[in-house]
Image (tube, grey):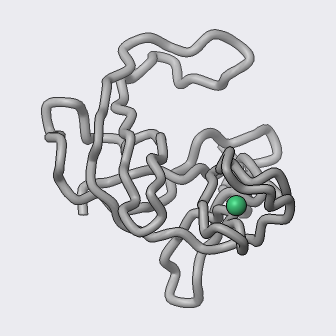
Amino acid sequence: MQDVTNQEPAIDGWFAVDDAGNPHLIGAKCPQCGTYVFPPRENNCPNPACAGDELESVALSRRGKLWSYTENRYAPPPPYPAPDPFEPFAVAAVELADEGLIVLGKVVEGTLAADLKVGIEMELTTMPLYTDDLGVEHIVYAWRIA
Ligand SMILES: [Zn+2]
């Protein structure tokens, strides 16, 4: 058995952790029309009525309301890593009111669809997705009940 000595994001640049240890998502905002987008990108404003082509990186709200959810009862196909035996997990679509965005994400282990209800307050957290052969824990953002 290997000790976990390192953690790194499974996907670079989608979330960050502030000095207090609280994770937040990183989105992008159009300085011309104020439209937000997630995942972040550097150009091409998503607003069809806006010609803005340079988006700035911004921290998104850490909390939002549960807009929709589902439960995944089947292991994803390769190459996606899945624990064996597979454990069902919930997926939440959370509405960030200030940004007008709906962000999909896994729900933390131990919380399944039966525990969720549309409209409840959800909070961003992180969780390990898998540990690689070098003992590096790969971290993803996740939602938990606030
Ligand atoms: Zn714009």
- Pick whichever, 19 or 43, lies toward us: 43
* Residue 134 sits above or below residue 99 on the image: above
- Pick whichever, 4 or 145, lies toward us: 145
- Image location of residue 41, percent across then percent down: 79, 54
For residue 90, side relative to residue 17 (left or right): left
Q: Residue at x 29, y 35 (%)?
A: 68
- Pick whichever, 142 or 134, lies toward us: 142
* Residue 115 sits above or below residue 88 on the image: below
The residue sitting at the bottom extreme is: 19
Q: Quadrant of ligand 1?
A: bottom right
Q: Residue at x 47, y 53 (%)?
A: 101
- Image location of residue 22, percent across then percent down: 48, 77
- Image location of residue 37, percent across then percent down: 63, 54
Toward which corner of the image does residue 92 lie, by quadrant? top left
Quadrant the N terminus occupies: top right
- Image location of residue 72, percent across then percent down: 38, 20
* Residue 137 sits above or below residue 86 on the image: below
Toward which corner of the image does residue 76 lie, by quadrant? top right
Toward which corner of the image does residue 79 lie, by quadrant? top right
For residue 89, side relative to residue 110 (left or right): right
